[in-house]
Every structure is written in C-alpha cells, then in structure tokens.
C-alpha cells in the first residue's frame, strides 16, 4: 500500500508538469480575452481603471480584438485602435466612471447559456463516472484477480488526485484561462475513460482512473468560478441552483445505472457510455466556451504545490484508510501525521509568499468563513449517510445494488427539481431562512434514520430519504453561494478552490468518522448481547436449549449438534442486530452534527461582494 502512496505522489507531480507543458504559451502573446470580467475600480486606487486595456499587446490567435463600440459607451469617444480607452493623462475623470464602464455586465460581453450548458454537461459526466465504479468493484476483483485493498485504489487514487488538483485550480485559471483549461480537463477525462474501457491489466485501469481524476478535479471548481464571473450577485442563486443539478443528480443515478449495467453487461460498458458524451461536450466546448477570467502570468509556487500535495493528500488518504483499518493503524497515524505537518507548512507558505498559489486570506471574510464551515459539516453528514444506508440495505436487509440504488433515485429527482427553485428563492430572500428550514428538515429526518430495525419497510426508508433530500436541496448550493457572494471578483477562483477542497476533506473525514462510530458501537452492542446470553441466565439458557432440541429434531442431528447450531443462529442474529444498532448510533451522531450546522445557520447574513458597498 505504501508503494501505491509513493506512486500517487510521483504521479501528481508528473500531472502538474504535464498540465503546465500542455497549456503553456508565450507571455508576449498574452492579453485579456473578449468577454472577461474587468477588475473592479477601487476608490483608493484610481489608476486601476487604466489597466482595462493595455496598448501594444497583440491579440491571441483565434480571439477577436476589443470592441471599440464598447469603449465608446464608456464615454471615451476618442478611443482609437492601439490606444488605451482610459488615458493616464485623465486621472481626474476616473472616479466618475459608471459601473458599466469599469465592469461590463456578463450578458453584454458573452452569452452565458452555451457556456453553462457545456460546463454542466462536463460536470455531470465527470461526477457520474466517479460514482459508477463503486458497484463494479467485485467484478473488477474477479476479472483482474486482485485483492479488495488493491482495487480500492481505483476510488482512493481518484480522490487523492482530486485533492491535489482542486487547490491548484485558482492558479491554473489565472495562468491559462477558462477555455483552454476546461478543454484540457475534458481531454484528460476522455483519454482516461478510453484507457479504462480497454484496460488489459489492473495497472492500466488504475492509470486511466488517475488520468480521469485530473480532468474531474479541474472541472468542478472551474465551473463554480465561471458561474461566479458571468452572473451578477443578484442572479447567482438561480444559476448556482442550476449547477446543483449535475452535482446532486449524478451521484444518485450512478449506483442505479451501474447496478443494472454490471448485472446485464460487462463492467467496461461503464466507461464506454461516457466516452461519446465527453467527446460531444469537448466539441461543443471548442465552439461555445469562452475565456471569462482575467489572464495573468503567475509563477508556480513549487513549495506550495509540494506542501499542498503532502497535506491534503495525507489527510484524505489517512481518513480513507481509517474507515477500513481503524484510527490506531500505523498506516493511518503516519498518513495523518504527514498530512497535518504538510498542511501546516502549506498554510505558512501561502501566508508568507508574495504571490500565493491559493489565497488563504479569503477567510477574513466572515460570511465566507461561516458558510464554508456549515458546508463542510453538511458534507460530513451527507456523504456518510450515502455510505451507511447502502450498508444497511445490502448487507443487512439483502437488497441488490439495483434495488438500493432505486431507493435513492426519487430523492435525487426531488433534489434536482428543488435546487433551482431554492436558488430563485435565495435571490429574493438570501440564504439564512432557507438554510434554517433545510437544516431543520435534515436534522429531523437524520434523527428518524437512527430508529432503523430489521423489519423497517422499504417504503418508510424511501419516504425518509426523499424528505431528507428535500431539506438538503435548500442547503448545498445556497449556503455556498452566500459565502462566495461576499468575495471580490479577483478572489472568486481562490474561494471556490478553497471551498471545494475543504468540502472534500470534510466528506472524507465524516465518512471515516461515522463508519468508525458504526463499527465501534456494533462491537459494543455485540459484547452486550454476548454478556446476556450466558449459562448464568437460566431462563434464557433453557429457551436456547429447547430451540436447539427443535433444530436437532428438524434436521435429524444429535441433540448436542442441535445446541451448537442454535448457538450459531443466535450469534448471527446478534451480529445482525449489533450492526443495525451501530448504524443507528452513527445516525445519532450525524444528527448532532447537523444540529450544530442548524445553530450556525442563524448567523448567516446577506452581503455584497467586497468593494461594491463603497461604489
């Protein structure tokens, strides 16, 4: 396992070099693309507006020149080709520029619709493919003759590469722009899918998954950053609600679709079905995707990358293995130790370097800090429940993967319908009362899940899950948008990268923590049952002996063998009930976690991006 971890680190560094090599271009050809969001004019820096258009720079191949008609609308009727719209000789007029002159509305510069469609399709196929593989793991173990620990790296490695690339997305967006970066991400994803589909060995399959993870790790934070840049704050709720459709719908239909495919076809079909979708989206991106971010030429902070890789990678790997091997495992302790040290060095580096790879000062904005904490708590509860429920449904109740997936599907449909509606409500009233209502529903339904029994009906579980997803639909995107709305535009990419990174770490931590609670409490409950069923309890011992005699008579076995068979049956029932009790205890802990988020939600306030209040 340590060999895989070392290989992951080397692969991550190679990926960084490959992305940099693939997207590199000459600095002399760099300019701001059509439709980019200009840097807001700060009152205390009147000269900032002069940088909107710089003279003497050549346009990139394939990009249009700045529209002089737009320049004329700003009040400078003397603007001519080769001259800046705002002349350095006119500083006295800069404070009187209208907002439209400094920060053009997105719909005046670009068409958001095609860009949104391309981004949502890419995000949907990336998230869908990430969840398809889980159900196919037993088939992969059989086909490639590998152990469970080895095949688990298809999931763990994917998560680790994501954890490395997400903090880097802010740097990549500023250096390469949104168009080239998205197309590169889709190319990585498609190439990885092809490798996985035709993989002759497990090593090739793992390599394909890691290459896919490179694309998937870039797509999600890139999509959020683009949404923040092309939509004004008063329209972001509806836009981010629409973005939540692939974010929430794909993980729900993934297990259902995967269960049906692996029961009827080869697991390779899981990768074949995403290839044409990815190729079509790549072609549409070539036609419709535009640069919407300000391009610069930031220098890669190599030490920051190394510390980020060790920090977030170590934590994610440690939390992942803690759910399997326990928190006291040597491998887990070493991984978490490396992760904490790496994270501390990363924080120190980003706060002291002149141009940080990831701007940690986004946390000085109070609403962003609060909503990031709430979103992380929600992810702990959400993803842990997505692990606990399949364990109960498949391992305890004996439902097939397809049946358990179908149980989750209606909740996903409800969430897909309600998320855009919640976004529209957010644009009108803000996030506070949406968050309070959603968290109240989520807390109550999570508590109801702590009352599962061996006979709980399928319909009751289905109704509870639908109600839980209904509550969640008011939370995930609205709370995140409320925090990101407070950030100035120049920090949008850093805010989305930090938010996505911490949410992923929180999901991994929550899953490991609640699985540990389930396992620990199941052992405690089993020990309690074992202490009750002893020879010191004459009434119970007499009933067990009678049950053994009945089994012996029914099977034609000696009475002593019947008693042993009765003990095995009772032990199996005790283990089954112990696991149910452990799952219930884990849901009780999850209820407490969501209750903490509910209290914090009352402190969310409605804000405007920093700098707008003074304009």
Image (cartoon, grey):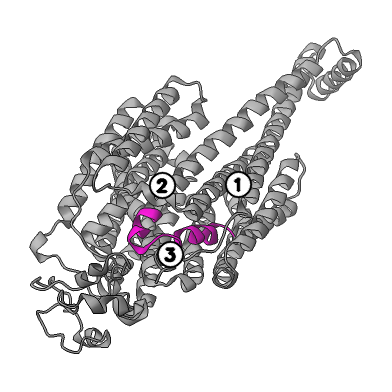
Residue that appears at 50% across and 62% down: 244
Give the crowd class for mark 3: few <14, some 14-19, many >=20 residues within 10 Å.
some
Can you tell which of label 2 and label 1 is closer to the viewer? Answer: 2
Lateral position of residue 59 relative to residue 118, left or right: left
Residue that appears at 36% across and 69% down: 118
Give the crowd class for mark 2: few <14, some 14-19, many >=20 residues within 10 Å.
many
Q: Residue 501: give its label.
A: 2
Counting residues from the start of the chain, the first of labels 3 and 2 encountered is: 2
Q: Which residues are magenta?
A: 475-496
Locate residue 218: give its quadrant.
bottom left
Q: CA distance from mark 2 to mark 1?
A: 33 Å
Residue that appears at 25% across and 87% down: 75
Counting residues from the start of the chain, the first of labels 3 and 1 encountered is: 1
- Of 515 and 549, nearer the camera is 515
Q: Which residue is mark 1?
A: 400
Q: Is residue 273 magenta?
A: no
Dot 3 falls on a residue whose secondary structure is: loop
Q: CA distance from mark 3 to mark 1?
A: 48 Å
Lateral position of residue 560 relative to residue 79, left or right: right
Q: Is residue 476 magenta?
A: yes
- Of 261 and 135, nearer the camera is 135
Q: Which residue is mark 3?
A: 609
Residue that appears at 24% across and 37% down: 303
Question: Residue 480's spot in the image, x, y percent?
Answer: 50, 57
Dot 1 falls on a residue whose secondary structure is: loop
């Amino acid at each position: 396992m340590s060999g895989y971890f070392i290989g992951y680190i080397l692969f991550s560094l190679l990926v960084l070099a490959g992305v940099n090599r693939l997207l590199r271009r000459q600095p002399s050809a760099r300019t701001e693309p059509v439709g980019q969001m200009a840097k807001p004019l700060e009152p205390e820096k009147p000269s900032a507006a002069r940088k909107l258009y710089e003279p003497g720079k050549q346009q990139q191949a394939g990009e249009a020149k700045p529209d002089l008609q737009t320049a004329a609308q700003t009040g400078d009727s003397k603007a001519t080709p080769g001259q800046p719209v705002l002349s350095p000789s006119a500083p006295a007029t800069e404070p009187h520029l209208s907002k439209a002159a400094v920060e053009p509305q997105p719909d005046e510069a670009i068409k958001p619709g095609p860009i949104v469609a391309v981004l949502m399709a890419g995000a949907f196929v990336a998230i869908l493919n990430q969840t398809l593989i889980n159900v196919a793991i037993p088939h992969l173990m059989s086909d490639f003759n590998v152990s469970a620990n080895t095949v688990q790296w298809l999931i763990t490695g994917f998560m680790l590469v994501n954890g490395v690339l997400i903090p880097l997305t802010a740097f990549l967006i500023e250096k390469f722009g949104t168009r080239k970066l998205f197309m590169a991400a889709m190319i990585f994803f498609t190439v990885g899918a092809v490798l996985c589909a035709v993989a002759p060995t497990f090593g090739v399959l793992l390599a394909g998954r890691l290459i896919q993870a490179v694309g998937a790790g870039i797509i999600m934070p890139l999509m959020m950053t683009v949404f923040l840049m092309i939509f004004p704050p008063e329209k972001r709720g509806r836009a981010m609600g629409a973005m939540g459709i692939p974010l929430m719908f794909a993980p729900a239909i993934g297990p259902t679709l995967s269960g049906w495919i692996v029961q009827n076809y080869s697991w390779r079909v899981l990768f074949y079905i995403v290839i044409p979708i990815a190729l079509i989206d790549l072609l549409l991106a070539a036609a419709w995707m535009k640069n919407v971010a300000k391009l610069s030429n930031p220098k890669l902070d190599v030490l920051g990358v190394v510390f980020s890789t060790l920090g977030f990678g170590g934590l994610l790997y440690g939390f992942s293995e803690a759910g399997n091997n326990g928190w006291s495992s040597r491998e887990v302790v070493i991984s978490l130790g490396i992760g904490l040290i790496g994270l501390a060095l990363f924080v120190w580096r980003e706060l002291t370097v002149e141009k940080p790879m990831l701007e940690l000062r986004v946390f000085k904005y109070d609403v962003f800090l609060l909503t990031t904490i709430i979103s992380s708590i929600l992810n702990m509860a959400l993803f842990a429940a997505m692990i606990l429920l399949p364990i109960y449904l498949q391992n305890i109740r004996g439902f097939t993967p397809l049946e358990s997936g179908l149980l989750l599907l209606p909740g996903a449909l409800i969430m897909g319908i309600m998320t855009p509606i919640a976004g529209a409500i957010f644009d009108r009233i803000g996030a506070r009362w949406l968050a309070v209502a959603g968290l109240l529903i989520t807390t109550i339904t999570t508590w109801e899940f702590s009352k599962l029994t061996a006979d709980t009906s399928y319909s009751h579980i289905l109704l509870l899950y639908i109600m839980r997803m209904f509550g969640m639909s008011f939370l995930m995107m609205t709370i995140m948008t409320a925090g990101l709305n407070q950030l100035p535009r120049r920090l949008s990419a850093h805010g989305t990268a930090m938010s996505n990174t911490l949410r992923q770490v929180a999901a991994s931590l929550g899953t490991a923590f609640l699985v540990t609670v389930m396992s620990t409490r199941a052992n405690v409950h089993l020990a309690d049952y074992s202490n009750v069923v002893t020879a010191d309890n004459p009434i119970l011992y007499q009933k067990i002996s009678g049950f053994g005699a009945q089994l012996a008579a029914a099977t034609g076995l000696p009475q002593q063998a019947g008693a042993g068979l009765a003990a095995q049956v009772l032990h199996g029932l005790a283990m089954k009930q112990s696991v149910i009790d452990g799952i219930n205890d884990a849901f009780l802990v999850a209820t407490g976690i969501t209750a903490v988020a509910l209290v914090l939600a009352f402190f969310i306030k409605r804000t405007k991006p920093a700098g707008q209040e003074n304009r």
